[in-house]
Amino acid sequence: MTARIKLLVPALVMFVLVTGCSRSEEKQTEVSAPAGKTSAAKLPPGSVLLKGAGATFPAPLYEKWFGLYRGSHPDIVVKYEPVGSGAGIERFIGKGVADEKRVDFGASDAAMTDAEIARAERGVKLVPMTAGGVVLAYNIPGLKGELKLSREAYAGIFLGKIKDWNDPVIRECNPGMQLPKMTITAVVRSDGSGTTFAFTKHLDAISGEWRQKYGPAKIVDWPGRAMRAKGNEGVAGLVRESVGSIGYMELGFARKLGLEIAYLQNKSGNYILPSPESAVTSISSAVLPQNLRLFIPDPDGPDSYPIVTLTWVLLYDRYEDQKKAQALREIFNWCLHEGQAYSDQLGYLPLPAGIVERSVATLNTVAP
């Protein structure tokens, strides 16, 4: 059956993260009042400092949320480090982590596993906060037209089997397109990544060979001659610099650098570009399990974008500091209600009402 093409243009407004380098060269976003930044050493009396670390994907949205909240709650300061989901989970668990690296909350695009949860001595609450699409951005100078990739094509590229942009499998998806005879270079994450987990969980769902050899994971021993970069920003930057490359990343990072994005074939056989409309279609009919660990590796629906993920805030069951517990409940309640209005304009997905209700119920069980 001939696949029909759906073009759903996203309305995105992206902004630049305010970051700085720590001694470990991890990026840190300090969210502060409009008047300026407040260091931990100069917090006003009675203020509450909340430290978080984890996924790079939600960092722009978190910065927006925390900044707006601080504007009306100047006594709450949030410092969030977008170090990647894997590192964020380890810092949240806290075993063997230096005191200055310990956090009050984590964030991940890959829900914590049972084994990871068992290592967290204070218990764990997983709270879905937003969702979005993982895209394949490419660098083929002079290519005219919109590149379409079938499931066989993009799985084959990241399996290291399809090595040239003029491969017959890719030509079959793009009749009439003048595809160059050019080596394909896959760009992948070097760090533990929720984005990698979402992408490989999708590959696991659509490719028996991927499922047999690799499966879903936050870190992968990639086949072939893949180039590696840290964080979504690193992958996007390397794709921009490398002719013939293709890499997976969150939508906003590709848009920020003006990268070309491939149409991907969904389960119905249609080629879809990511957008808030196509991605929300992918999650709207999903049923959230009791543990809130919802994965949608291959969404149903003719208009669904095929690679989407929720992103979670990681909270402890119990906090020794009552003020921190209360501040965390209040700020994330705000994010799940008033804050959802800002998701769409930044390229994220406002959560369906049913997921918001379950997230709030879980959040409100956090105890001092």
Image (spheres, grey):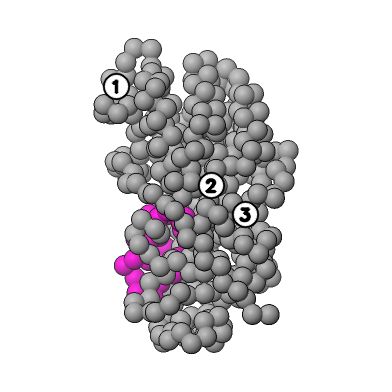
Q: Report helix, strand or loop for mark 2.
A: loop
Residue 243 drawn at (x, y percent): 34, 74
- What span is colored magenta in the figure? 226-253
The residue labelled by disc 3 is 281
Identified by mark 3, the residue type is Thr
List x then y, in percent, for residue 94: 51, 33
Mark closer to the chain start, 3 or 2: 3
Residue at screen point 56% across, 67% down: 6
Please provide percent x and percent y for residue 350: 55, 43
Residue at the image point whose x is 34% and y is 46% from the top: 15
Q: Which residue is mark 2?
A: 349
* Residue 341 visible from this viewpoint: yes
Is 288 rendered above or below residue 249? above
Say the numbered circle drawn on residue 118: none
Report the front residue among 251 and 342.
342
Q: Could you tell me the amino acid type at mark 1?
A: Ala
8 vs 237, left or right, is right
Q: Residue 231 in magenta?
A: yes
Of residues 121 and 146, the one nearer the viewer is: 146
Callout 1 secondary element: helix
Q: Foreground: 273 or 98?
A: 273
User: Which residue corresponds to mark 1?
Assistant: 41
- When the figure is inspected, residue 344 is found, relative to residue 124, above or below; the finding is below
Residue 94, can we see it?
no
What's the residue type where badge 2 is placed?
Leu
- Location of residue 268 by image quarter: bottom right
